[in-house]
């Protein structure tokens, strides 16, 4: 025992002097309280939860797009206190949470509207759960936008749960292939939209949910078990840039899965063993824009710190030590930490304290992960539809496991003005919830949520920090209608050329819109058009 302790000390000492591959920077402003779960919202802000409570806060990047220099604000609080629970950002930009290993919300769920800043309870039917509830349930968004969740305490052994977006309701989901539940399991989404898990019984069994078949099927066996010898814990799971999946083990064993591309079983192989006898018993990892994985490891035999940081290189199948935010290690255990992929290509790190850190990897973003823009169309309601490829990214971003989910495989729209100021618009109605969608054209809507003035901007679409090439985008002028006597005055700014004013009295007719017959005159830097009121209601739009 004495020799073993001395041996470990030597390894730690050698690890401590390893030159870090990336750089850590503290977030300038401390969070209002201890932070655990962090979610990326579709407007580019970070939604951060109070540790073991019901309070939420928002981290907003500064005008230069810096999260390090971002500001904190208070959001509405949940109805229930929760700690370790399911969380999913839906295709309309709202956030669904369910359960809680600790707190008052084990058997409840809620929906957060970021625009209205309101939490609304979502009723849970009595036939879905036992009295112990969802607890720390794992969840994934499905191709149809609904959410698949595995309660730790389903009413019937092996049942899952489905959240239906259209009806804002829960129903019983597809039964697992084996076992009673998915407690302490990690799920990863594959390029074919199937969901892979390592079962918590049998230790080396895996199964997969096939959305097109709406059922769980048996899959291959791991070469060795990856669960920790205490409490059956392990870490998260990530999709790698080459299409394989990496599962990080609690006992130091790690596993690689190669998909078959069909419903047939894939193949498993051993990944590099975690260095120095470390493991990850619940804890974070994050896919980075350079294709490597930032991992946090610690003791494989207990739930105490310290913890250490490594980068996993899937090409070399190797781990390289990197420094912690404040030295060679962090004092906390792995389960006390969370990571989140940010739109600027960095990783946000919280260790259940008020001080947060940003890790910026070295190298450049993967060319294979770059989104492309093929078209942007203005919609009648003032929003825009952006079409392109790989808008959802080539991974789900960061991971933790069953206790916390922070998937960010959805498109963000970033605008940069002539002065270099950066703004994120709110995206919603994503046509895809997948990963590695290749050359398939997918779409998202976005709106001028930042209330930016009309003008010419450089637009990028971003997925998990990997950015598209810039697109020259004209944000159209805003129409302001005013009623004056028997005339309707319509004004709009003149700083963006090439727009034509049209009017209509009946929006239900396909030929409703016509060019306004009255030529505009310039007044105080605005175009002013005065029309007689020829109908009880009139509509105006600007088109290019």
Image (spheres, helix red, strand yellow):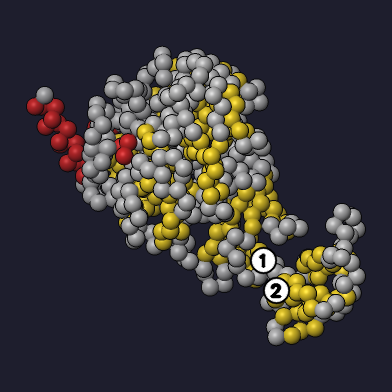
Residue 496: mark in rendering:
2
Side of 11 relative to 471 (left or right): left
Residue 494 percent across, percent down from the top left:
71, 77
The residue under the point 78% across, 74% down is 483
Side of 420 relative to 282 (left or right): right
Circle 2 SS class: loop
The residue under the point 76% across, 84% down is 522
Residue 379: mark in rendering:
none
Side of 283 relative to 302 (left or right): right
Marks 2 and 1 sit apart, C-alpha to C-alpha, by 8 Å
> Quick one: label 2, few (<14), some, or many (20+) residues within 10 Å?
some
The residue under the point 35% across, 26% down is 233
In the picture, the quarter occupied by the C terminus is bottom right
Q: Are marks 2 and 1 in contact (CB under 8 Å)?
A: yes
Give the residue number, with chain letter if any, for mark 1: 475
**Marks 2 and 1, the one that precedes in the sequence:** 1
Side of 440 relative to 59 (left or right): right
Residue 228 percent across, percent down from the top left:
31, 24
Q: Is residue 8 above or below residue 309?
A: above
Q: Is residue 134 above or below residue 519?
A: above
Q: Residue 369's image quarter?
A: top right
């Amino acid at each position: 025992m004495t020799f073993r302790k001395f041996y470990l000390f030597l390894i730690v000492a050698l690890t401590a002097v390893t030159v870090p591959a990336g750089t850590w920077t503290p977030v300038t402003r401390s969070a209002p309280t201890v932070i655990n779960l962090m979610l990326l919202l579709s407007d580019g802000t970070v939604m951060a939860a109070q540790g073991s409570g019901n309070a939420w806060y928002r981290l907003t990047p500064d005008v230069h797009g810096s999260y390090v220099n971002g500001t904190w604000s208070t959001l509405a609080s949940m109805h229930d206190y929760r700690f370790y629970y399911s969380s999913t950002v839906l295709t309309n930009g709202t956030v669904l949470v369910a359960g809680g290993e600790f707190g008052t919300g084990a058997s409840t769920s809620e929906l957060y509207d970021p625009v209205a800043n309101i939490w609304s309870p979502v009723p849970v039917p009595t036939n879905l759960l036992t009295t112990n509830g969802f607890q720390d349930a794992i969840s994934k968004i499905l191709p149809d936008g609904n959410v698949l969740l595995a309660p730790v305490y389903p009413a019937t052994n092996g049942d899952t749960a489905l959240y239906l977006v259209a009806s804002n309701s829960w129903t019983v989901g597809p039964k697992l292939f084996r076992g009673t539940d998915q407690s302490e399991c990690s799920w990863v989404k594959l390029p074919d939209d199937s969901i892979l898990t390592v079962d918590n019984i049998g230790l080396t069994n895996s199964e997969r949910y096939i959305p097109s078949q709406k059922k769980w099927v048996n899959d291959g066996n791991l070469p060795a078990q990856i669960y920790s010898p205490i409490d059956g814990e392990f870490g998260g799971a990530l999709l790698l840039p080459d299409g394989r999946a990496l599962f990080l083990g609690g006992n130091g064993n790690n596993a690689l899965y190669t998909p078959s591309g069909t419903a047939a079983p894939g193949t498993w192989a051993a990944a590099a063993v975690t260095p120095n006898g470390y493991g990850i018993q619940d804890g974070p990892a994050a896919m980075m824009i350079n294709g490597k994985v930032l991992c946090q490891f610690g003791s494989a035999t207990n739930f105490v710190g310290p913890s250490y940081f490594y980068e996993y290189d899937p090409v070399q199948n190797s781990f390289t030590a990197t420094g912690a935010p404040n030295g060679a290690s962090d004092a906390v255990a792995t389960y006390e930490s969370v990571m989140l992929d940010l739109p600027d290509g960095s990783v946000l790190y919280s260790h259940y304290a008020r001080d947060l850190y940003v890790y910026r990897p070295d190298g450049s973003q993967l060319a294979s992960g770059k989104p492309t823009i093929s078209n942007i169309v203005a919609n009648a309601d003032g929003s825009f539809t952006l079409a392109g490829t790989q808008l959802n990214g080539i991974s789900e971003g960061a991971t933790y496991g069953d206790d916390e989910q922070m998937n960010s495989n959805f498109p963000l729209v970033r605008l940069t003005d002539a002065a270099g100021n950066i703004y994120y618009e709110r995206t919603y109605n994503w046509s895809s919830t997948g990963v590695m969608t290749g050359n398939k054209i997918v779409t998202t809507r976005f709106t001028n949520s930042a209330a930016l003035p009309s003008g010419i901007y450089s637009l990028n679409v971003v997925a998990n920090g990997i950015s598209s090439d810039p697109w020259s985008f004209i944000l159209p002028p805003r129409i302001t209608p005013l009623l004056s006597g028997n005339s309707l005055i319509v004004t709009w700014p003149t700083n963006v050329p090439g727009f034509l004013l049209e009017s209509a009295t009946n929006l239900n007719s396909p030929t409703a819109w016509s060019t306004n017959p009255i030529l505009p005159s310039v007044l105080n830097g605005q175009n002013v058009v005065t029309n007689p009121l020829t109908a009880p209601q009139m509509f105006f739009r600007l088109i290019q």
